[in-house]
Image (cartoon, grey):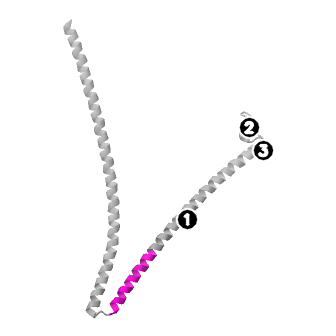
Amino acid sequence: AGEASPAAAPAGRSMDALEVARSVEQATKMKEQLANDSIHRAKAEVLAQRAALQAQMAEQERLLREEEARLAKLEQELRSGCNKDERLRVEALRKEIETCGRDEKALEREVARCRDTMRKATDAYVDAEERLNARRKSRKELEQEMTQLILATGKAKDEKLTGLLMQ
């Protein structure tokens, strides 16, 4: 128990076998703890995903029960108090309504897909516009630099020629 830890060993001193064993054991325990922590986080994530999936399934089940109840109510209404023509018309309307409901769901998915596509296209457009503006700014700066260089060179040449003429 009163021995120095490997970290406290003076520089240049070699560690004895007991110190090496303790150091290896300590490093192994730390790695095991890191692995354990990682596994626990992964398990927690899996449990959270499972809970979310179960909640989603419960909501789907609830919606299906509501739809079944609504359809059962429609069926009951069909059986009670309607004459044949009305019953046929109600049945036809029910089928059209169900078809419309299915079509609406498909169209909602299509709208969501198109919205996502539009968002991506907008992002790409904004990115391209920003790159274009940056390139235009860069070109203007280069043009200004070139103009200043041409003017400076011309001015220097003019001064040199004026100096030669003055001699």
Question: Disc 1 marks which amino acid?
Answer: Leu
Residue 13 screen position, x and y as percent: 75, 34
Q: Is 25 displayed left or right of 131 in the figure? A: right
Q: Is the stretch drawn in magenta largely helix, strand or loop?
A: helix
Question: Disc 2 marks which amino acid?
Answer: Ala
> Up-down: is 43 above or below 54?
above
Residue 74 screen position, x and y as percent: 35, 86
**Pick the front one: 2 or 11:** 2
Badge 1: few (under 14), some or many (20 or more) residues near its Cα, within 10 Å? few
Residue 18 is a magenta residue: no
Numbered disc 3: secondary structure = helix
User: Which one is in front in this view, the residue at disc 3 or the one at disc 2?
Assistant: 2
Picture quadrant where residue 12 is located: top right
Quarter of the image that includes the C terminus? top left
Q: Earlier in the sequence, mark 1 or mark 3?
A: 3
> Extreme top residue here?
167
Badge 3: few (under 14), some or many (20 or more) residues near its Cα, within 10 Å? few
**Could you tell me which residue is drawn at 77 percent across and 43 percent down?**
17
Residue 66 is a magenta residue: yes
> Disc 1 vs disc 3: Cβ atoms closer than 8 Å?
no
Distance from label 3 to label 2 (Cα)? 13 Å
Q: Earlier in the sequence, mark 3 or mark 2?
A: 2
Per the image, the residue denoted by label 1 is: 47
User: Which one is in front in this view, the residue at disc 1 or the one at disc 3?
Assistant: 1
Per the image, the residue denoted by label 2 is: 9
Badge 2: few (under 14), some or many (20 or more) residues near its Cα, within 10 Å? few
Name the mark on residue 18. Answer: 3
**Could you tell me which residue is drawn at 23 percent across and 19 percent down?**
155
> Extreme right residue here?
1
Provide the residue span drawn in magenta.
60-80
